[in-house]
Each structure stands twice: as structure tokens, then as C-alpha cells.
Image (cartoon, helix red, strand yellow):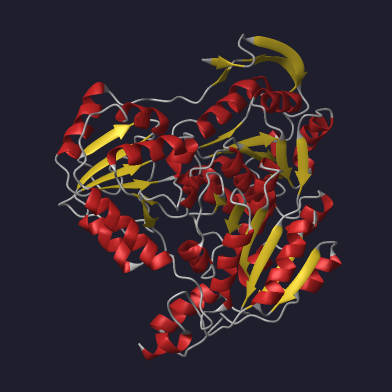
Amino acid sequence: MCAHHSAQEKMNMTAAQAIVECMKRETINQVFCVPGESYLPVLDALYDEPTIRVISTRHEGGAAFMAEGYAKAALKPGVVLATRGVGATNLSIGVHTAYQDSTPMVVFLGQVHSKFRGREGFQEVDLDQFFKPISKWAVEVKDPERIPEIVQRAFRIAKSGRPGPVIVSLPEDILPVEREMSFGPVIQRPKPAPSETETNQVKQLLANATSPLIIAGGGIKLAKAEELLVGFAERFTIPVMTAFRRHDVFPNNHPMYAGHLGLGTSKKILQLVQDADVILALGTRLSEVTTQDYTLINNDQKLIHIDIEHDIIGKVYPPCLGIISDLYEALEMLQRIKVMPSWSVWAGKCNATYREVSDIPPSEDDVINKHIIHMLANKLPKESLLTNDAGNFAGWLHAFYPFTEKHTYVGPTSGAMGYGMPAALGAKLAYPSKIVVSLSGDGGFMMTVQELETAVRESIPIIALVFNNNMYGTIRMHQEIHYPKRVMATDLGTVSFVDLAVSIGAVGYQVDSLSQFESALDQALMSQKPTVIEIRTDKEQISVSSTITQLRNR
């Protein structure tokens, strides 16, 4: 079905203006960039478009992370603009994140003049070939008249099937050229549904099950099917686990919740997966982390894999039944099947196991990290949105923070460092009324710390928590496991994140105790300014489960 502009329309305008017109038709209202001379005509066209806010960032990597975080939260494409090879390669980390995280993104890159291509022109990179392995589609526009066709196709590809990033390379000489532009309709995202035969096959597999389990991924969020998943789990008493960093697709306080599959997942929860006889993988690619290095599911289990992208089905595990479907459509169909559940004891065991390993109140002996997660859970409004960087500090978040509402978590399944704070800025722009909190280690935070100035300049009030142990903690952990006591390249210097924050107009706090953190958090929640809370942590407590000494002794 066509949306918005339904008829074929022709208009005289420049190629740059046609790009902005395509954005308008896609209801894009946020664009992230670092300005560059190679695409100045596009910036000039945006000057005349009041419905699109342009966020100029300090680094292309930060711009890409903001766009990715915005897209994850808003469930619409994030748009990034950058210049030629130098800007393009800087933002490639965000493109890779969008690719692994199935996030819709459209990236417009200025390119050298068409006459200079192939001569190693200034900042020349063969952009479509460079990005091809980490994007859904990468294309260079050769004819200005084809801008509407190609850009509209770019948005369609980014949104359809398994979402992802699309790269559009724009030689600088085509952008100011005026032509009669022909615009097609904006197409809604296709939503395939299971066939009646497939639905009956699911029914048969469940009818013969004794311990079924759901693994739910980002496809649930993409399809806006969270409520349907809850209804399906309740109707058939099937426990639900969430895939890596997809915590918020199912309420963690629900009696059918059975835990999160990710880094550091309790062995007791992993055992539940291995004890299941039928696994319904819903909207998940069954990634390396979710499946614990592809070891979690065995050949004796019956796997029902439902995903909107045909390439995902059987990519890791050959399913007993593979169904290509939008998850909203699939769950609507599956609600209608008639199966009498006989596994209520199993479902109760799964939830009890999850509560046993996660509902552990912090004690005086616990490190400050756990106390802080517990305090966040008690103090933040339930609809608050959390983002996180890569690092061991996230283990406490994964293990002990209960995500009870949908659209409350944005995290990189790609494991990219530097993600947390810029993604929080994007998420805050998507949900201005939500409190948005980012969690980072000192290593990751420093990789994109310059975007704190973007937050100040653009008045984006997020709260950034920085767990500072003066080292690259995750790598140090692996170093101590494989090469104990041979510390190399993982220690970092001292940085005053408070002084850094204050120097660019943000609010800063440094805390060493829970009472200090509580005071800082209370003030941050009342403030409408970007705030950094630096939490000084002990190097020795390297992860949720181990100290450095314990790793060395093993």
C-alpha cells in the first residue's frame, strides 16, 4: 500500500534538493552529520527545510552512533551525512553496528568529482565497494536524474526484510545539477505472514512438546509485537528468554520470563535452554553471543525459526521448521492454534531459575557496580531508556537491571566501544520525554567523549554514567585468563571526567560511594542539562563473577 504521496510526481529541482525531498517523504526529521565541502549542496537544501533538524557532530563515528541509536529507538531509518573517504571511513564503525544489529540506516556520502574518479583524487575511496561487505546495499549515483529512484530505493531496502544500513555515494558534480525529478510512492514495509500449512506444523510440534522455550530477538521490536508476544507466552504457558541485548522485547518481571542470553549468562539459565525440547526462535539471528559460541542448541532439539529475512533461516542452525514472516503477523496467526499446554511445571521452573540468579539484593560485600544498578532500578521511572557501551561494566546491567517496559533499552549487539553516550543522544531525540541514561567504561567513553559537546550545544539532556577503573577492563580480563600477570597495553591514565564535562558546559560529578551516587543521580534527574557521573571503581573486581586474583589463581 502506498503512503503519503501516492501518485508519480515530477518536479524541477537540483539533485541535492531531490535528496531532501525524499527525506521529507520518508518523514525523516533528524539528520546527523559532520559537514564537508563535497556535499555542501545537500546542506544548503536542508537549510530551506524546516521539518528536518540537522545535528552537526564532532566526529563521524559519533554521528553514525547517534543515528543508529535514534533508529533503534524510533524504529525508523537513521540518516547520516559525511564527506568522501576520510569522513566515510570514520563512520564505518556505525555502519557495521547497524549491519550486525539489523538497524535501518541511510548514509549519504560526498564523493570526488566524476572526472577525477580513478585518479586517486583528493580523499578518494571507492565507497560503494568499501562498504559493500557491511551494508545491505551500496551504490554510487552517476546520473542526477536518477536521484529520486535510487534514494527512494535506498530507504525501501534499509527498512524492508531484515533492516540494515544502505550507502549512497554522491559525486560532488551531480549535486547542483537541476533536472525534472520523478518521485514514486513511499511503500510501507512488507509484512509477510505464515501460511496455514506452516501454522499447523507449529501446532503439531507444540502438541508433542514437554518443555518448549521461546528465544525472542530484535524482530519482535521491529514488528512492534511486544504485546502479542506476551499474549502468546501467556496463552500457551511458554517461557521466554531474550537474545543478546534485546532485554526489552519481553517484560523481565513477567512470570513467563526466563532470562537473557548474552555475555556472562548464568550456567543455570543456559542449562534451561539445553533442557528444552522445542525452541521457538522469534526474530533472532541466533548470534555467536546469544548461542554461547554457537554451542547452545543441539541436534536433539526441535527448532522452529521464524524471521522476516530468508537468509537468517538456517544460517546457524538448520531448523525443523523455518518460516519467513513478520513477527506481528506470525504471532497473530499462532494465537489461533489450539494446543493444551502440559508444561506449567517447566515454565515455573524457568522463571524460578531466572529469579534465583537475578533477584539478589546487594550486600555490604558487593562492589559499587551492583549497588548502582539496584539503585537505578529503584529510582528511575520504569519507562526510562538505557543505553550502554561495550565493556565488563555492562555485565552488572545485564544481570541485575529489570527491563519491564518496551522501548527502554538500546545496546550494540556488535559490541562497539564508544557507542553508549552518542546512542543515548540519538535515543533522547527519538523520545524527548523519556529519561535517557548511558552506561560506559572509561575506555569506551573516551572514544566518543567529544559528542558531549554536541549534547550541550544541541541541548540534549542525557545522564552519562562512566565506570572508571583506568583500564580496558574486558581485554584485561582475557589477558589475565590467557596470560596471567603479564599485563600489556590495558592500563590507562587518569582522566578527570568531571573537569572535562564542566569545561564544555555539561554538569559533572565524581563519586566513590553509593550515597554520593544517589545524591548525584537525584540532582541529575532534576536537571535538564547533559550530566556526567564518574563512578570510581576498583580494578580488582574485573567482572561480575571474578576478581583479578581469582583469575590468576585459576
Is residue 241 visible to us here?
A: yes
Q: Position of residue 480 (x, y in %)?
A: 44, 83
Q: Is residue 249 above or below residue 348?
A: above
Q: Position of residue 503 (x, y in %)?
A: 85, 67
State the residue in front, 193 or 474: 193
Residue at 32% x, 26% y is: 333
State the residue in front, 261 or 475: 261
Q: Position of residue 439 (x, y in %)?
A: 61, 63
Is residue 35 visible to us here?
A: no
Residue at 48% x, 62% y is: 398
Using residue 436 as the reference point, say whether residue 371 is left or right of it: left
Q: Is residue 509 above or below residue 230?
A: below
**Image quadrant of residue 521?**
bottom right
Q: Is residue 479 above or below residue 289?
A: below
Which quarter of the rendered picture does the C terminus lie within? bottom left
Residue at 56% x, 83% y is: 539
Residue at 76% x, 44% y is: 55
